[in-house]
Image: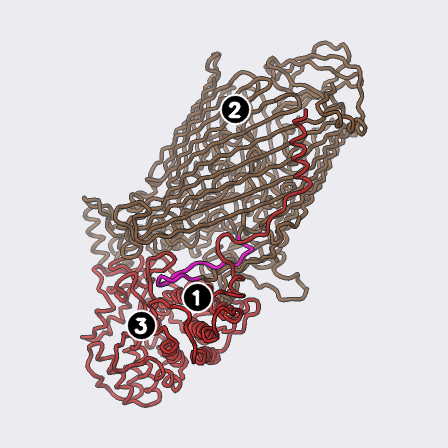
Chain colours: A brown, B red
Amino acid sequence: MKRHHYPAAWALVLALFFPCFLLAQYPVTGTVTDADGEPLVGVSILVVGTTSGTITDFDGTFELEIPDNRSELRLSYTGFAPQTVAVERDIAPLQIVLQEDVANLEQVVVTGLASTIKRSNLANAVSVVSGEDLTGVTSQQTVDGALYGKLTGVNITQTSGAPGGGYALRLRGVSSLSGNNQPLFIVDGVYISNVEIASGSRGASGANSANEEGASNRIADINPDDIESIEVLKGASAAAIYGTRANAGVVIITTKKGVSGETRVSFNQDLGFNTIIRKVGRRSYNAAQIEEAFGADARDQFVAAQAAGEIFDYEDIIYGQKGFITDSRLRVSGGNEKTNFFVSSSWRDEAGIIKNTGYERFTARLNLTHQVNDWLKVQSNTNYIRSQAARSFTGNENEGGLSYGYTLAFTRDYINLFPDEFGNYPDNPNASGNPLQTRDQTRNDENVDRILEGININLNLLRTGNQSLNVIFNGGLDFILSKTFVYVPESFQSQRGRQQGFLAEGKNDLFNYNYSAIAVHDFYTESGINFTTQAGITYLNQSADQLLSQTTQLIPLQTNLSQGAAQSTNQFLLNVEEFGYVVQEEVNVNDQVILTGGLRFDKSSLNGDPNKLYTFPRASVALNLHEFDFWSGDGPLDQLKLRAAYGQTGNSASFGSLFTSLAFVSTGGNAGLTVNGRQGNSGLEPETSSEIEVGTDLGLFDNKVNVTATYYVRDVTNLLYDRSLPTSSGFGNEIRNDLDLRNRGFEFQLGLNPFRSPAFDYRTTFNFWLNRSEITRLGIEDGSDGEDIPSFVPPGAGFGLGLGTFYINEGSPITGLWQSTPDGPMQVGNTEPDFQFGWNNNLTLFENLDINFLFHWRQGSELLNLTRFLTDIGGTTPREYDNLDSFIEDGSYFRLREAGIAYRFPLEDTFIRGVRVGVSGRNIFTITDYSSYDPETSVNGGSGLSTNLEVAPFPSSRQFYLQIGLDF
Amino acid sequence: MKTLFLPLLAGGLLFLTGCEIDEQFDPNGPSINSVLSDATKVELDLLVTAIEAGIRNGYAGYVTASGTIARELYIFDADPRNTEDLLGKEDIVLDNNTFYITGPFNSSYRVVKNANILLEAVDNTSSVSEAEKDGYRAFANTMKALVLSRVLDLLGDNGIRVDVADPNNLGPFLSRDESYSALLGLLDEADAQLQGADFGFTLSTGFEGFDTPETFQEFNRALAARIATHGERYDEALTYVNESFLDLDGDLSVGPEMIFSAAAGDLLNPLFKTPGQSGDQIIVHPRIIADTTAGDLRVDEKFRLRQQSTSQDNLNGDYETALYPSATSPIDIIRNEELVLIYAEANINRNDLGTAVEALNVVRNAAGLADYDGEVTQDALIDELLYQRTYSLWSEGHLMFDLRRYGRLNAQFLPIDREGDDIFVQFPIPLAEGV
């Protein structure tokens, strides 16, 4: 049992400190099956009190040498409850039946950078979504969009309904206002980028800033079907070990790996379509009403149009497309004792609800695991993605005449905007663009080529009877080559006489890499206490070179950058380096008490002092009362865990915040340098978030009933924020960090599995969560001396107090919507929901019929609906909304988010093992009082305070699918 | 087994030495500190151009926001606040955090900041001569006064901040009267600096004829005359205008300009609107059309009859702006025509009515109108002066302040287009100022 794979010197040193004993052994053999008698392959079997063990082979059998002083085996297998079996010398071959782990207690969850822990021993409410939960019901567009309603503590906003994504994920409320305030995404150890890459379309549309361009966020590149599981570390107490990248939480994605055994091939084909989630409608008019609204000339036009039968429904003409979707996925996996592989490829082609919009994504993946020998394991995960999105123009703009919602608001249905016989589009007499021309002749495209590569080397330096030492090297790279293309022809209404055509091409080269080296030492005492110690380093490097070239004054019909009279180039360079040390200690006393303590030290080039280390501690305790001897086990309660966790994370300012830059301007051919509005701060420190989380996990009636309840308090101190400066200073805003924010929340999950048989199985999960925020400090501490910071409107986070905006005011939530009133600025709404509720149901009937549905209820989340503001002015708001007096509306909704019904054909074929046919849908119906398209919306992209502001969005869609799956 | 040593060694070294991160610099542009000490002449010149370029920003907002309030024009574009807030639709009041005030306010103070950086840079460098330093200073102070006078026009009795060199310690908002004194003081300071100054920098062709210390001084005095007029200091105005490039017999169009081009980093004329365009258009207020005099050349020159009348938010108009022929047409900063009118106005208020009539006739004749034959009283001449200013300076950012100065910015003198509309007399101080 003892393995010497380290050099003699090591052996000597270790032998001195950790003596180990050579003992007599006895053999045990056996077979492991599930309840149906099917052999289980790869079940891990551990001799209790040692680190030695084995796994079952293809027939579910195993053979093991057991030291004389040991008499228990512990069997564990993903998806099955663990079992401890007593053994003794000369025992007959064992027949072990594993029971399914209905409560997922055995699920393994990542807690350190290189160690895992069983869910039942976890001190945090870490949400885990399996690949099956993610994509099992219906076809998913993107990973982040697929999560909503499936776990607690999450708020997701859709920044664009265009195919190809546009989501913003918030875990346990807003924790950061600047920089990357979205969670850190890690795929197989690779820190992946979730940037939104702007296309420069604001140069033509007049949108206020890059985040109004409605770009997709690049997590959309991940094929949801490749995912084995997603773990969401929602708060600082769980994510502390990730240091300065983890203030907004961490999403850890693990992709599927091959399993030793027969090669498995599966092919899935989804066919479906997109259709608008809801039509708002257009204002109805008769001739008299037209005259009253638009004047006598308009009445004549209207009457003539009516006579010619030319009253159009432009909403339907623009948004009424049924976009065809096809999604094909091929997976091949298998392996032998030494090498496992997983190969997948997918192709998704999706057309949007607006003609000429769509998304196409090709992915290929190879995951290889090779056990070089019994002390070295190498894993490589390679993913290539190529995607193209045609997103056209939506959202806020100024006089570009491009954004559909904007022009539709002013477009009158009695005006014929269709092209004449020569293909000339008439001008829109009431807006600065003809939406049909936008649809047919302009382009706003994104092209991405991306490679993700993760390498994981696991080196076992030592394994003795009661201890082991592993060193885990992890390296990852994420390379994105993104091209954007925007074209507005010179014949376009708003272009004529001014820009005379607009062409912009972006080339964005983003390269991120990270590595870590962590040593993990496990030590088991005689009395069953397990110490896991880890220490290591991490490094992250991000760089970007983003070039945007644009040309105006185009030569007619040319779409080449050099074919225009006015050319300009813009370059943005970024380079970020971060380095950290990690130590963590975990103590597990017989699964009864589990203690964890850890420290992370981080430095970052984003901080004022790039070499100053900031410390982020964590500590947690989990108490499994049911594991104690005094626990009788007679009552209905099978599991009772009490847990508490504390941790800190940080976040550095966004790139460029340290500098006060001068920008290039020109007049009359002379170059100039001007201040650009933002005052930098060369002494910035990271903001920190400290969280205390307490909770309990209960299992009742053979774990048919599971309850998880968590309460947390998260305090963000020294929050980095842009403050609007008195602009008479010449600067628009400055970056500061003297703001404290508190988020408190409650998360509750009830899982029921009342019927549990192959013929009839019903599982249901109720998720309930809420979050409340409060700005606890702005400027100096209350009561101390100095000049305090007055309440202010954060830059770029709304549309001024005249219409509605976020507003930073001590003692108020950070998510409030404020407006000017005669008594000064007042909070008139709150974008934070009162609560959210997800209800997931999985039903299996007649052994082979699967019925799944997920309801999602969001209660009390106000939106600023400026789409209606525009249609009011343009005279196109449906009459049913005439009596709505405020543009701030209730965004509560109840939605059937996903539903699917599928039949698995029982086959006894050796070639085709399984055939599955189903129909499913997403966003099938929504009950809401909200007067516009979809209450999940944001005009401002994913970062900052961006939720619940609606200005002429790309409407969300409903999707329906026919799904066919084949397993070979 | 020896292979193990390599990764261990590598890991161990990394762990021990860590990773030293280099001091950071901005890869995307020069930083402010580089120009504040020991600036080169090139850097000073770059700041001069930034100031000249910067006075164009916010000008369109200044013109259209004040012009809407003065009922000389409507803005029909995609932002409804142009027809709601500015016209006081249904009890809406002007907001202190909306683009119509924050836009012109912010861009003006951006220019002031650049001017203050230039002043500080000039004080801390030895790369130019003393005479050249005075040239830079005079330029900076004159341009500061130009942009600050726009802010003062908009804010009216609220006054303005003038001392804003230290962003962490901003000076107070001065009263209206103090503000006028401060601006005239700035211009006088520049005027003094121009004595014996050298211009080491090159201005754009927009300043052709005003790009030497002597000719720039005439521009400086012209600005002072305008500001003194807005401040109702007519004696001073007369003195200033006489020292300016006022020429009663000369070309009324003479004066420095803001110029535009499609080049990289440059701007297009924001007040040019494509003929016939809808959705983004400056519409002439119907009262302006209704009041025209037959034969007035300015009417055809500035207003274009639309093929289709247009309406938005229950407002209608048949004419659109024709002030600028193309997107690269220059915009006058101040021209002889305005100086003649200032000269007339100062004389009316000093009760030198004969001189005033002569000056008014210069403008009338240039517009193709016969000599003034109305009553020669102060009141009648003020009516005549305001009429001529309305058409000579339409959509150039004057009328709101002209009407206000004579107590006519109210419903007694201006039409109310929609029931419930209001006429505002000044803009609020932007919220971000925290006052």
Give the chain letter at badge 1: B
Q: Is residue A642 something one can see in this rendering? A: yes
Please tell me how crowded label 3 is: few (under 14), some (14-19), or many (20+) other residues with Cα within 10 Å: some
User: On the same chain: label 3 and label 2?
Assistant: no
At label 1, the amino acid type is Asp
Which numbered tag is attached to residue B314? Answer: none
Q: Could you tell me which residue is drawn at 69 percent across and 12 percent down?
A: A29
At label 2, the amino acid type is Phe
Q: Could you tell me which residue is drawn at 41 percent across and 72 percent down?
A: B199
User: Relative to A415, does residue A225 appear above or below in the rendering?
Assistant: above
Closer to the eye: label 3 or 2: 2
* Residue A268 sits in quarter: top left
At label 3, the amino acid type is Pro
- Position in image of residue A656 (x %, y %): 53, 53
CA gap, disc 1 to disc 3? 48 Å
CA gap, disc 1 to disc 2? 63 Å
- Position in image of residue A164 (x %, y %): 43, 38
Along the line of sight, the residue nearer the viewer: A487 or A718: A487
- Position in image of residue A241 (x %, y %): 65, 41
Residue designated by label 2: A342
Along the line of sight, the residue nearer the viewer: B100 or B333: B333
CA gap, disc 3 to disc 2? 77 Å
Residue designated by label 3: B415
The N terminus of chain A - image quarter: top right
* Residue A398 sits in quarter: bottom left
User: Relative to B146, does residue A529 appear above or below in the rendering?
Assistant: above
Which numbered tag is attached to residue B45? Answer: 1
Instruction: Give the residues in magenta.
Output: A656-672
